[in-house]
Amino acid sequence: MAVHSKIVIDLTENLANIGEPLMFQGEFALSSDLLPYPQATLTKVEVDFDVTFENPNVFIEGEITCFIEGICDRCLAKVSKQIYLPFEQTFYKDSAADEDAYIYSGSKLDVTKAVCDEIVLSLPLSFLCKEDCKGLCHKCGTDLNKQTCSCDTTPDNAFSVLKNLKF
Ligand SMILES: [Zn+2]
Ligand SMILES: [Zn+2]
């Protein structure tokens, strides 16, 4: 399947079907720089949209799926996961709207920027292997998801383990 780094919707059918939601799906390659996680890779992005021409504006609602490979903030395990982001946005025709609005012209709607903005704004700030990851003991480095240790301490984030390691 062809993977594109720009998400452009051909509106030809929409323009002929006012008010009717038409499906738009695809997978795309967007920059890993969008991610707030160090050393993580945005493997691909899938979009699943309903696109409705509401003469003259275009309304989109649906879902963005981010496929991310990274390292758990707490236990440093390698993690591949999918994060689903709901997406809802109106695109205004030409310059009929204020400067901050997303616009389109003609029969092509480039939603790349809107999708990138959504990813930047909506991804959770921490990247965890699971919501209740117990992390590493910050004294002995034991992975507290797998076993307990006898240190008298509460789990801290993984970076303090790295800080205490002597090379
Ligand atoms: Zn973890
Ligand atoms: Zn410990």
Image: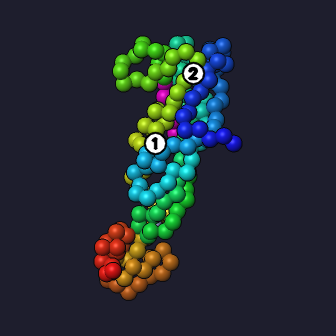
Q: In which quarter of the image is residue 76?
A: bottom left
The residue wearing badge 1 is 119
Q: Position of residue 1 (x, y in %)?
A: 69, 42
The label number, if any, that marks residue 134 in the structure image: none
**Callout 2, which amino acid?**
Lys
Residue in view at x 46 percent, y 32 percent: 114
**88 or 103, which lies in front?**
103
Q: Look at the numbered disc 1 and give the secondary structure of its residue.
A: helix
Q: Look at the numbered disc 2 and give the secondary structure of its residue.
A: strand
Please identify, in this view, whether the residue under mark 2 or under mark 1 is nearer the observer.
Answer: 2
Residue in view at x 55 percent, y 43 percent: 29
The residue wearing badge 2 is 108
Residue 130 appearing in the image: no
Q: Where is residue 145 in the image (x, y as percent from the top left)?
A: 48, 74
Task: Quarter of the image for the C terminus: give it.
Answer: bottom left
Q: Does the magenta stretch include residue 87?
A: yes
Which residues fall within the magenta stretch?
86-90
> Is 152 above or below relative to 117?
below
Mark closer to the chain start, 2 or 1? 2
Residue in view at x 34 percent, y 69 percent: 159
> Is 97 above or below relative to 22?
above
> Is 66 above or below relative to 62?
below
> Is 119 above or below relative to 129?
above
Q: Quadrant of residue 139?
A: bottom left
Q: Where is residue 34 in the image (x, y as percent from the top left)?
A: 43, 45
Residue 18 appearing in the image: yes
